[in-house]
């Protein structure tokens, strides 16, 4: 039996540094075949974990982005109506009988797979990422519960399709609304936080190995300090990596060297007008000085 | 590192201990069933359960279901498993478990209440509360508000009130529809063709899709978020407003309710209780400090920073029921409302004083708030609230 540490190391191999909490939860979710519910602020790497897991398991990543009004025809399956219509016309000209036409137009050739159906029909278990589940409405959540517990989908014209393999399901939520207790209970839960200094350094090192150690410490220190400021949109890990890339692109070796360039690069971290106003050049320079 | 609890030898193995732990969590407000106990045992078999840190992570991922749970979990885990070598006599719980629902509020409420205490509950609250009683608006507060601090809400609101309020709330809820979707429907042609139904209908005409069925987006009701001021100067109006809140909660499952005086309390879950009177009882327990001073600005600021981030969006209507008498500077209120407004919601302020003849929004707080409001109306009774229907429909 592999332990969660093995999984953590494997994830690190793909460039994803998972905390102990997250790695254990993921390991348990995989072993027990339960969905994993990830909550946390935007930009902490919730979506990324699914990608990393798919790479580790060498399997396909199937993603379903939730939005308000997402319905079964977008999430599960839909008949290819245009093709069906054409086929009916063609059949009537060729003089085919009704039963044969019906059997053909309701065959799998005419079925459009959407992510959920696609996920349960794979030969090798894929990673199914249901992103931002809290954006979908409650009706969809209820339907999802059914799919996640039975792993089967009923199509009236075809019959019930049962999963060949159980996908590894990862759900993410931003806290747009409260999720139902039923869904929470079905899932293994992990809360993903902003990484601490050491973890973030490791992330930066694995994603951008060319960054020098001194600058990397400055970048991470700066971003961590910035998260303590009162901001509307706290910069996430992705923003930190953009920031590092921007600095690298400008050939900066030291954060404190040129306040003007630093301010220009802040565009990668601060994404609203009032956040920009909250961190004027002096403040940025002061934080950079402390971070060094 | 603290030592692991030693269990009495008579205790029958790990399964019993884990179920004892689950009962321990349940007593502290975790919602866990038998299925979770089973999952917890399975989860422990996935890690090395002899290592306390592994066991902790494994149990946490199964038992905790929200951020609040996680914050509590570590303490509860330590209390049960790491009790410094103390011998635990009996882990298998006895049959009867105290009915906590009546005495304690639901999970979110408890944690919120404690958080709030930390955030805004200033030590001088009591003093300020009594101060604003006396300095309030003379006539308004003098008669009734002697000491409602510990008074039962049930004396204020009756079951009939709630039923009447429910009807009003339903009507208001209907008035508040998402305008965008309504326009689409009026266009007579749906945005997209409903092919499934078109196919179905074409059967009648031998497979020729003569009539195209179309799809429109259904009307979506707006989410109503209500913040009710229950400070001293508002006590005379608490009755219709609380009934209204209770009615609203029962009529509309997407609505959300808060009380504030010197601190902000979320009462949504409590108000959803099946029994309306028991719901009020739960609120009484939650809203300790009724009839005290009001810190509208600070409370709205806190609301904008915390709950609003999750529950308020472009389809929300925030209704504030308050007289605008703030014991703090009006700037705080202004910035708080501006921040709330940026979440693209509608803000309606219902002020009981506005109904008075010759009333001008002179309370400094009210003056600061006005520029951010979508509607500013009078409301003292349930009838007034019902009359709002047309105002709301025009928003």
Image (tube, coloured by chain):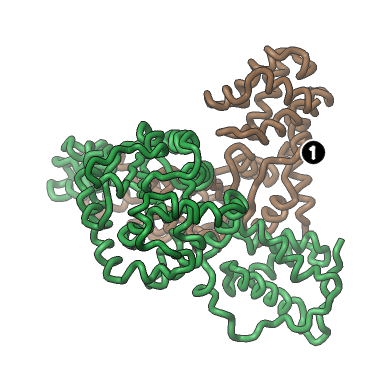
Chain colours: A brown, B green
Query: Foreground residue, A117 or A139?
Result: A139
Q: Percent position (x, y) of residue B116?
A: 57, 53
Q: Chain of mark 1?
A: A
Q: Percent position (x, y) of residue A34?
A: 60, 59
Total residue callouts = 1
Q: Percent position (x, y) of residue A258?
A: 74, 12
Residue shown at 36% from the left, 63% from the top: B144
Q: Is residue A254 left or right of residue B144?
A: right
Q: Is residue A13 left or right of residue B317?
A: right
Residue shown at 72% from the left, 45% from the top: A18
Q: Residues within 10 Å of mark 1 (few under 14, many from 20)?
A: few
Q: Is residue B65 left or right of residue B246?
A: right
Residue shown at 48% from the left, 59% from the top: A180
Query: Foreground residue, B349 or B351?
Result: B351
Query: Foreground residue, B380 or B309?
Result: B380
Q: Percent position (x, y) of residue B346?
A: 35, 39
Residue shown at 61% from the left, 86% from the top: B95
Q: Is residue B147 left or right of residue B207?
A: right
Above or below, A27 relative to B33: above
Residue A168 seen by the camera: no
Residue topped by disc 1: A198
- Image quarter where the C terminus of chain B lies is top left
SS class of the residue under badge 1? helix
Above or below, B164 relative to A122: below
Q: Quadrant of residue B257?
A: bottom left
Residue B213 seen by the camera: yes
- Image quarter where the N terminus of chain B lies is bottom right
């Amino acid at each position: 039996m592999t332990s969660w540490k093995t999984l953590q190391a494997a994830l690190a191999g793909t460039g994803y540094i998972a905390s102990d909490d997250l790695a254990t939860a993921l390991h348990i979710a995989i072993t027990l075949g339960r969905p994993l519910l990830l909550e946390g602020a935007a930009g902490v790497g919730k979506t990324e974990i699914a990608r990393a897991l798919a790479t580790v398991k060498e399997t396909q990543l199937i993603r379903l982005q939730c939005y308000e009004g997402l319905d079964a025809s977008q999430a599960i399956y839909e008949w290819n109506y245009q093709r069906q219509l054409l086929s009916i016309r063609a059949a009537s000209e060729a003089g085919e009988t009704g039963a044969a036409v019906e059997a053909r137009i309701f065959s799998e050739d005419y079925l459009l797979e959407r992510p959920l159906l696609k996920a349960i029909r794979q030969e090798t278990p894929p990673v199914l990422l249901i992103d931002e589940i809290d954006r979908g409405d409650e009706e969809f959540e209820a339907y999802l519960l059914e799919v996640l517990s039975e792993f089967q989908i009923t199509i009236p014209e075809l019959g019930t399709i049962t999963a060949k393999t159980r996908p590894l399901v990862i759900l993410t939520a931003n806290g747009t609304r409260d999720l139902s207790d039923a869904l929470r209970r079905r899932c293994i839960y992990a809360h993903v936080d902003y990484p601490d200094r050491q973890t973030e350094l490791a992330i930066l090192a694995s994603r951008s190995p060319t960054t020098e150690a001194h600058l990397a410490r400055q970048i991470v220190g700066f971003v961590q300090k910035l998260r303590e400021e009162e901001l509307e949109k706290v910069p996430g890990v992705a923003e930190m990596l953009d920031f590092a890339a921007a600095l690298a692109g400008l050939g900066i070796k030291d954060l404190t060297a040129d306040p003007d360039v630093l301010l220009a690069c802040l565009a990668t971290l601060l994404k609203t007008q009032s956040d920009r106003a909250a961190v004027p050049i002096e403040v940025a320079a002061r934080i950079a000085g402390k971070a060094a | 590192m603290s030592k692991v609890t030693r269990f009495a030898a008579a205790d029958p193995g790990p399964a019993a201990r884990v179920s004892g732990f689950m009962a321990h969590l349940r007593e502290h407000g975790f919602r866990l069933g038998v299925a979770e106990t089973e999952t917890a045992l399975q989860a422990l078999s996935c890690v090395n359960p002899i290592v306390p840190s592994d066991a902790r992570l494994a149990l946490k991922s199964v038992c905790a279901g929200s951020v609040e749970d996680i914050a509590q979990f570590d303490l509860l885990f330590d209390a049960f498993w790491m009790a410094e070598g103390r011998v635990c006599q009996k882990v298998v719980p006895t049959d009867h478990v105290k009915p906590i629902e009546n005495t304690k509020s639901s999970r979110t409420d408890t944690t919120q209440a404690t958080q709030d205490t930390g955030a805004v509950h200033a030590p001088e609250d009591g003093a300020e509360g009594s101060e604003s009683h006396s300095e309030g608006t003379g006539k308004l507060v003098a008669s009734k508000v002697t000491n409602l601090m510990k008074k039962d809400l049930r004396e204020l609101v009756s079951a009939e009130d709630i039923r009447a309020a429910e009807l009003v709330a339903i009507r208001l809820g209907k008035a508040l529809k998402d305008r965008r979707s309504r326009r689409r429907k009026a266009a007579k042609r749906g945005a997209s063709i409903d092919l499934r139904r078109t196919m179905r209908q074409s059967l009648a005409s031998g497979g020729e899709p003569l009539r195209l069925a179309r799809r429109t987006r259904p009307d979506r009701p707006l989410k109503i978020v209500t913040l009710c001021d229950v400070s001293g100067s508002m006590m005379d109006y608490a009755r219709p407003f609380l009934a209204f809140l209770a009615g609203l909660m029962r009529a509309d499952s997407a609505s959300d309710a808060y009380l504030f005086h010197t601190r902000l309390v979320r009462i949504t879950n409590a108000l959803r209780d099946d029994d309306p009177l028991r719901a009020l009882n739960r609120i009484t327990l939650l809203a300790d400090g009724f009839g005290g001073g009001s810190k509208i600005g600070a409370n709205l600021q806190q609301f904008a920073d915390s709950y609003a981030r999750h529950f308020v969006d472009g389809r929300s209507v925030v209704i504030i029921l308050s007289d605008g008498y703030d014991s703090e500077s009006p700037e705080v209120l202004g910035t708080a409302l501006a921040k709330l407004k940026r979440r693209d919601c509608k803000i309606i302020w219902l002020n009981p004083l506005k109904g008075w003849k010759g009333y001008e929004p002179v309370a400094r707080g009210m003056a600061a708030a006005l520029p951010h409001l979508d509607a500013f109306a009078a409301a003292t009774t349930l009838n007034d609230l019902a009359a709002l229907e047309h105002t709301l429909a025009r928003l």
